Structures are given as structure tokens and as C-alpha cells.
Image (cartoon, grey):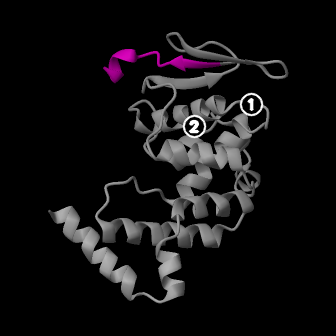
Amino acid sequence: MRKAMSILACFCLACSLSVGARAEWEADYGALMIDAAASGDNAAGERWARLRDEKLDALGLGLARVAYSELLLLARVIHTEAGSYWLPDKWRMAVGEVVLNRVASVEFPNTLEEVVFQPGQYAGAADREWFCSIVPFRSSVEAAWRLLNGERVLKDKSVVFQSTERQGSGTALELRDSLYGSTYFCYSLHPELYA
């Protein structure tokens, strides 16, 4: 009943808006955030994220909130680690999932920014100024969006390593490319922490 009332209130609000405001209200803010990140228009991306949050609040939807800064940061990691156009989406998704698994892990820092910029972890992020100037490819932004909205390919929070060598307590997934060779997505040395 509460959801129906919320939808009715939003419908009445949408009907009272001007044509321009109504078009903006009905916009797919997620798609606009992706467009902004893939084109380097960060001011627009922040605006679309704010409007998306306002819309989610007004509609009472339980969808994931996605901070534009986190979308862009995760997309940049994916871009530098698996951005080549010929790599499959599964590769990009697995790279981003390892990053998010680390954020959720007790073995690594607690925020996306701390995980990405942890010394010795992501080579592309070692030069912070250069890294923060990257405009990621659309495929990297789309993978980041999917991950930040809960989609997973590895489906195991203990997969916290990604490398060209096997490490941790075992390999969850090996992806092979004729140019780059193998990339291994590996379990923590302490899988008991993820039970």
C-alpha cells in the first residue's frame, strides 16, 4: 500500500511538472551517468547521480545508490586492467569484482579509493594524477555500473587477487588472451574469513 501511495504521489508530481522538467524526471539517470563518465563530463555525471538519488528517494525504490565518483574510479581501474576492446565483458566484470571484494574484505582497506590507491596493488593507479585524468572506455564504465548495482560473475567474496601469476589459496578463474596471456583470479590466503 505504501509503495502504491508513493507511486501515486510521484505520478501526480510528474504530471504537474513542465514538459522540460518532466523529461528530466523521466530520464534514465544511470545511462546518463555512464554517458558522462565515458565522455569525461564529470560535472554532468555528478548532477545525474544527484538527480538519480532524488528520484530514488521520491519513488521509495530500494535500488542501489551509485556515487558518480565511485562509478568513475571503478571504471578507471577496469579500464587500466582490462580495457582492451577485444577482451570480453566477463574479464572486465571479474577485475571490478575483485576490487569490490577487497573493499568488503577485512584483509584490505574499507573504501574503494583506499583499495585502488593501496601501494603496490594496481599499477595504473601508481601515478595518481595520470590515473585520475583517464576517461575510461564505455565498456569499462558499463561493467562498473553493473557491478555497483550488484551484478557478479565470480560470485565468491573470497576472490581478492588478480594477477598474471597464481597466488592466494587457489584459482577461481583463469582468463587467457593471445596478447596478454593468462590472468588469474584467486582466492584469499584466508578463506575462513569469508565463511
Q: Amino acid at mark 1?
A: Leu
Among the 4 quarters of the image, the one containing residue 184: top right
Residue beneath disc 2: 96
Image height of 190 relative to 90, above or below: above
Q: How crowded is the residue under tag 2: few (<14 C-alpha within 10 Å), some, or many (20+)?
A: many
Residue 96: give x, y in percent of width and height: 57, 37
- Residue 162 versus residue 140 in the image, above or below: above
Name of the residue lying farthest toward the left:
1
Q: CA distance from mark 2 to mark 1?
A: 14 Å
- The reply to whether the magenta stretch includes residue 54 is no
From the image, tell me which residue sits under label 1: 87
Q: Secondary structure at mark 2?
A: helix
Q: Is residue 120 visible?
A: no
Placement of the C terminus among the 4 image quadrants: top left
Which residue is at 20% across, 70% downward? 5
Query: Relative to residue 91, is residue 134 depicted above or below?
Result: below
Give, as a single range, the part of the protein colored magenta: 184-195
Q: Is residue 192 left or right of residue 84?
A: left
Q: Quadrant of residue 72?
A: bottom right
* Kind of residue sitting beneath label 2: Gly
Residue at 16% across, 64% down: 2
Mark 1 is surrounded, within 10 Å at the Cα level, by few (under 14), some (14 to 19) or many (20 or more) other residues, namely some
Q: Is 189 included in the stretch rendered in magenta?
A: yes
